[in-house]
Amino acid sequence: MDRKTSLLDTCAALIRDPVGLGRDDPRRVLHDHGPVLLLIALASAAIFGGVVGTYRGGLQLLYASIKLPLLWVVPVLVTLPAVRAFHRVCGIEVNYGQVALAVLVGCARSALLLAVASPALWLLFSVNVDYHWAVLVLCGSVLASGAVGLATVARVLPGSGAAKVLANALAALAVGVVVAQSGWVLRPFVARPRADVAFLRPVESNVFASTLASWRSARGRYDGWDARPEGLLATPPALAKETP
Amino acid sequence: MGGVPQPALRGASPPSRPTTPICAPSVPAVLAAIGGLGLFGLSAAIGAPSPQVIAAISTIPVAGLVGAMVLTGPALVAGHLFLRPNVATETPVAALGQGLTAAGSVALGIAPAALFLVATTGLWPLVLVAGFAAVGLSCAGVTLQMLRRATGDSPGFVVGWAALAALVALRVAVAVGQTALEVL
Amino acid sequence: MNDVVHLPALWIGIGATYLVVGATVAWVLGRRGVRSAVAVSALGCWPLLLPLLSAGPPPSASGPLCDRIDRCAEDLRSTMSDPRAESVVVVEDLDELVADLHRADQRVGMVDALVVDVRASSGDAPGLAALLAARARAAAEVEAVVQGMVELRLSIGLRSLAGNTVPVQERLGDLRARLGALDEITEFDLGRTL
């Protein structure tokens, strides 16, 4: 690993040989490449967010550019200890440094691929695609990119056989749940063209209840959906009444 | 060394699988595991509606898991002493300790994710139940794996013990939950 | 009772705790001499950089003499590029010498990190003394070659005064050969130790 690491070198290493980054001492790579990897992840997600914001335009461009990097980094920070715990309980000896590096590499690689593919998304959004289709395409892009990120994490971390499959499946489940809920909390990313622009919507219900309601609606059962404030982040009903 | 393989003796038992001795975890590791269970319980229970309920609910993982180990551990040790004379006496205790430390590390690992989900959703009971199940399965899985390594095979009674321990853990957890509901 | 739990103060407390931990990690890393970019990154993303807090200085791909090598190479390059120096040294030769020097220096740095790790885990393990002696010899050789680069710079000055009688090119070759011999010495040491 060269002492002087440029942004371009790290991007090339991320795309060509992410496993090579994990071969060296994790502490050394985190020290030499950590800030650059973080910068790549945040900047790439911000570029993608900007492209997503073009669907509504205006202030949503800025809001989406701020929120997409959060969607990429918050789940990583929250689930990092879980990823390590799942690997260790499956009998794969990994230290915290290896997991942190693998997760950072996976995060940066997936965000970089999203940023590279974002012109295609811009092209689609620029032809006034239907709002629901726009949301679906965004979800699909995030899913595909997340799968690439998780596959990268699996490749960088050691282990083999059924234990590795189980550990990575558990890690994917934990990361997937947290990413889905983070996306729900940080919505809207794709705002309707005539809707008011808001940085965040009130914390209410959860992504699982919303998905269930959408599933019911798709099957023709319109039971209605009561999106009540939930969780510690939600504004208490008493305060909500006072707020105009 | 490299000689002609000897034919197996008639009536001799098949060669057993190689065994690996188990080291009992250190006291700080066990305490850290219990701390991890407590932290996970607190992370999940913090969404409960009152401080008293939070206090009661947050003890469910520790009470359920440690309670089940204390109540069913002697059965595991006695079963091994009775059925496996060649296995060291401390082996089942060491395996239980390893299972507890694994459960503690999983609990500690999922605590931040549990806190995040509880903070942004009203699903704290689901988070608690799912996390407790993950922790319990980790504990049982590692204990069984350790015993299998130490004894060379997996006797049926160990699987039966795991089922008994799971039922006891559930009963203890339900008892603690009922106490919390009475407080509420 | 419900409102007691749902007060936003709880969430603010969690957020503030996260930031305070981040600031503490950044401060500790800063005191250990890590790059400022790493310390700044730790402010917001400290869970990812926690491994850098483990015992010992952060391992770097560079060796202990890295800065000195770079400084000497820079000085030598500027002397060579001076139009009055009439230097015949090919720049590629110098680049190769500097790359060799960095490689040898990185090996010394790797041994330093290894010694710290071994001492932390198992004290003065047998064989450590031999490794330390080999490390001292390698470091001395690297230092001697760096010193040779300083002398080479003086030779270029002398050459500009005395004409083409000072064999600058040959001296550069000697320095590379000396570094090459370092590998053989280390190999010999290794063979003797094992």
Image (spheres, coloured by chain):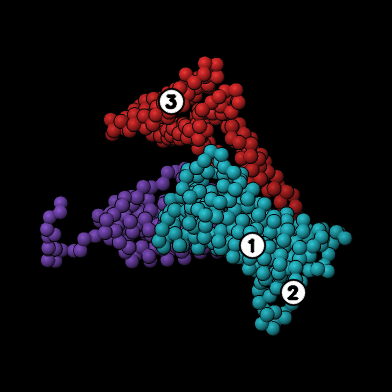
Chain colours: A cyan, B purple, C red
Write down the residue under mark 3: C170
From where the camera sits, is residue A178 visible?
Answer: no
Q: Amino acid at mark 3?
A: Glu
Determine the secondary structure under disc 2: loop
Residue A20, x across and y down, in percent: 48, 50
Residue A161, x across and y down, in percent: 40, 61
Label 3 – label 2 distance at C-alpha: 74 Å
Q: Amino acid at mark 1?
A: Ala
Between A46 and B182, the one lying in front of the other is A46
Residue B163, x across and y down, in percent: 42, 66
For the point 46% across and 26% down, the residue is C169
Q: Looking at the image, is C192 positioned above or below residue C7?
A: above
Q: Are marks 2 and 1 in contact (CB under 8 Å)?
A: no
Write down the residue under mark 2: A130
Residue that protrudes farthest toward the front in the picture: C163
Label 1 – label 3 distance at C-alpha: 54 Å
Q: Quadrant of the C terminus of chain B?
A: bottom right
